[in-house]
Image (tube, grey):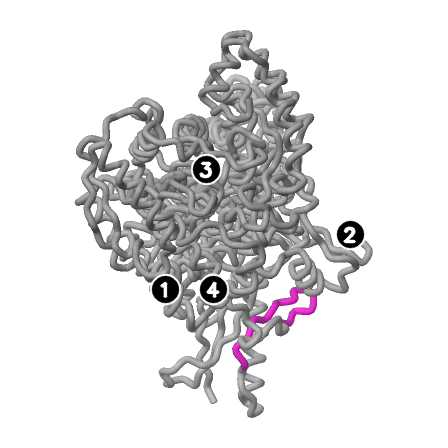
Amino acid sequence: MHNKTIAELGAGLRAGEFSSVELTRHFLERIDSLDGGLNCYITVTPDVALQAAKAADQRISAGDAGPLTGIPIAQKDIFCTQGVKTSCGSRMLDSFISPYDATVVERLNAAGVVMLGKANMDEFAMGSSNETSYYGPVHNPWDRERVPGGSSGGSAALVAARLAVAATGTDTGGSIRQPAALCGITGLKPTYGRVSRYGMIAFASSLDQGGPMTRSAEDAALMLQAMAGFDPKDSTSAEEPLPDFCAGLNDSLQGLKIGLPKEYFGEGLDAGVAASVEAAIDEYRKLGAEVVEISLPNTHLAVPTYYVVAPAECSSNLSRFDGVRYGYRCEDPKDLEDLYKRSRGEGFGEEVKRRIMIGAYVLSAGYYDAYYLKAQKIRHLISDDFKSAFEQVDVIMGPSTPSTAFGLGEKADDPVTMYLNDIYTIAANLAGLPGMSVPVGPVEGMPVGLQIIGNYFAEAKLLNVAHKLQQATDWHKLAPEGF
Amino acid sequence: MQWETVIGLEVHTQLATKSKIFSGASTAYGAAPNTQACNVDLAFPGVLPVLNREVVNCALKFGVAVGAEIGRRSVFARKNYFYPDLPKGYQISQFELPIVGKGELIIELENGESKVIGITRAHLEEDAGKSLHEDFHGLSGIDLNRAGTPLLEIVSEPDMRSIKEAVAYARKIHQLVVYLGICDGNMQEGSFRVDANLSIRPFGQEAFGTRTELKNINSFRFLERALNYELERQIDVVESGGRIVQETRLYDADRDETRSMRSKEEANDYRYFPDPDLLPVEIDESLLEQIRDELPELPTAKLQRFIQTYALGEKEAKALTASRPLADYFEVVVEAGGETKMAANWVTMKLGGALNKAGLNLADSPVSPEQMGGLLKRIADKTISGKIAKQVFEAIWNGEGDADTVIEAKGLKQITDTGAIEPIIDDIIANNSKQVEQFRAGKEKLLGFFVGQVMKATRGKANPEQVNELLLKKLKG
């Protein structure tokens, strides 16, 4: 049952082959027996899940079911869930029970999903390996000595390990696509503004975007359909019409123009990963696509730009965690300054503190122009690179990551090497473009991700392009041994 | 040495919107602590601000009224600092692209001349909450009801050269924002607060001296006293060989002194940057056009119109147009039948006095302008005398109905029927033969005595002119 997709399970539920309660129990049992070695979940919510499953079964028997009704999923612990601990992977929020639901949660609940629990993640979504979580690292189900990627590492690993059918993730610099690639699943980061950020704990507001993490492009389309759409509570959410993301999944790719940025295939790219990506591109040629080389000349500036913009915004976004109203407060503060210093000093982990300090530095008087303002200018240049590329091609493809999953602890002490793992994903965030990672041929038993970047609000096109590959190949069906 | 005073003011006006600038919570004053703070105001993780468009309209009204430059787009920025009553750890304000740019305001000086004061800018921002230090032993409480209340901060150029000018400017801004209906102007509740920057320089010197900033002054009287104290202090420091330190000082009204809060060196680096949660505010010509069309009549124009339309003296017109509610009240009185001069007198003197005595605002007046107009109409058509009118006014004040009802119920209608007054006069003449004799002997002052007797007998209802006339006829006759 756990190998089925949302589309398959939904059909089974509506046909009365099994109930949502049975399905939910099955997944809860799997979590019970298998998550111990993976650490994908921070919180498992069996009561919430079974209650939702019962409600879903009623909707199904009343003939009022949608495609997601009764489907067990996990929420990344960055999304606020009313009455359930929402930790964001941090000691700071270990005691925080959210008084409200994020818009994404509200919409998925309205569609009838069953939340099994809250997925582990890098603390405040800052990390590329899930090693910065206060709740300990997540293990990659393909090799438990390796990282699952981050920051949505729990979401990616639990979808790969079949500990939920799908999960939500968020992507600020690659946090959906990179773990999706390292865990061999399908992940979609929508256009900035497509999915509401309300109730999604902010890391870098101008880059953060929520999206689905699934085992197929079709499932991603079904999830996105429920998650996306204008939200009056988020001023940056787009008032764009919401297309039917499933309608064009099977459209022909004859004549599709794929651009391969030469900067994505240069130095630093693992040869095995390059070969896997090229094999996937060949499949697209067979499907009738035309492949051309393009250039995104400012690619090398993406990582440094990101590490100015994202920390700047995070240094301000995380100021609200001050030990005053909710969350962690140090023992016996002497005075106000002591309360601030120790609550934040003890409540935040090292990576979060590092980024807050970088952010405060680049925004401070005398440095603002040289760092923050300059980074904003480069951001425009990077967007312009894509703008000219999309005048020539329909989609851009390349590797999602430079290598397959690296070992736990391997890069933990070297932040700069860690940051470079997001070298191919960050540019799409800086430009606000939608991007996907889909699994392609594994290298030495470890998954590889093909990244597909589309034009603004072209999620339907991305899903179509990904779906056609998944119709022609079986890479996305591979499961890690033991799951 | 003769010192020249240089003053610039920053005025924080609380905008009179029903809900907060970035959330739907109410802005009503005086609720129990933290009952008007929603998830957004409390800065829960994940919440986002959504701009209340009404605050933009308020700011634009002000901008148009002071003839300011208004840019096509304006940007909200975060001002980062830690304080327990600042829940997000930053205040959403405006920095580089404020909604209102350069404008000007004309103030009237005591000598009758006027002076143009430059307005540097006016920007929108959210207010912080309040820290309560008194009620909890060894602890501080926080009330976030005020957090997120919309403010328009109006920054002037350092154009004022005396404390009188500064106070006149503050009053003029106050009058304007209340007129525009964008601020309730209630200084006790903190709806209008002033920060003052003051420096001194020798007359003739062009460069400004080092300034100090006086924070959070909430009355015109305190503004005057704080500036006076600070001016004296600066002169003392400089004349005794010291130097003024650039710093923020707090005015303590109880002790009537200013004292240092923090120096420039201790000042925060606010790390301003554009708020990524909010889109730039786009202002198009059609919106500005609409704002211009809807702009109410401004104080200067109203004053001119009152002088011309109602044939009032400048002093009366000024008193009536000092506040928009008063001017509106007056106009309704006139419309309801009050003669203009009489209406001006009654509204400013009689009603003003009664309200003052009762400690009421005009808005809470027990006598509506329609009722006042109805009363004055009865004076004008001689139904009642001015003296009886005061009695009727009191009855209306006490809720006994409008003028006609009171006159009817109490039988206060003026007696103008000669046939009714004559027998009374005859009686009085007959019963006061001694006084009649004296009058006829030339003691004409006694006429007053007879008038008084008649009025007493008619309980004030007789028409005084008529009584006079009849008495003279009969006494001399």
Circle 2: residue type: Asp
- Single out the mark in the foreground, 4 or 1: 4
Q: Are marks 3 and 1 in contact (CB under 8 Å)?
A: no
Residue B247 painted magenta: yes
Q: CA distance from mark 2 to mark 3?
A: 57 Å
Residue A302 painted magenta: no
Circle 1: residue type: Ile
Label 3 Cα crowd, 10 Å radius (few <14 / some 14-19 / many 20+): many
Image mark for residue A416? 4
Vertical arrangement, residue B382 with respect to residue B150, above or below: above
Q: Which quadrant would residue B337 be assigned to in this image?
A: top left
Q: Tag count in the figure?
A: 4
Secondary-structure class at tag 4: helix
The answer to whether one can see residue B468 in this image is no
Front residue of B244 and A176? A176
Vertical arrangement, residue B452 with respect to residue A95, above or below: above
Dots 4 and 3 on the same chain:
yes
Residue range highlighted in magenta: B245-258
Residue of label 3 = A185
Circle 3: residue type: Ile
Secondary-structure class at tag 1: strand
Seen in the image, is B108 located left or right of residue B23?
left
Which of marks 2 and 1 precedes in the sequence?
A: 1
Which of marks 3 and 4 precedes in the sequence?
A: 3
- Single out the mark in the foreground, 2 or 4: 4
Tell me where residue B423 appears, x and y as whole percent: 58, 20
Tell me where residue A141 appears, x and y as whole percent: 56, 41
Secondary-structure class at tag 2: loop
Q: CA distance from mark 4 to mark 1?
A: 55 Å
Q: CA distance from mark 4 to mark 3?
A: 26 Å
Front residue of B356 and A21? A21
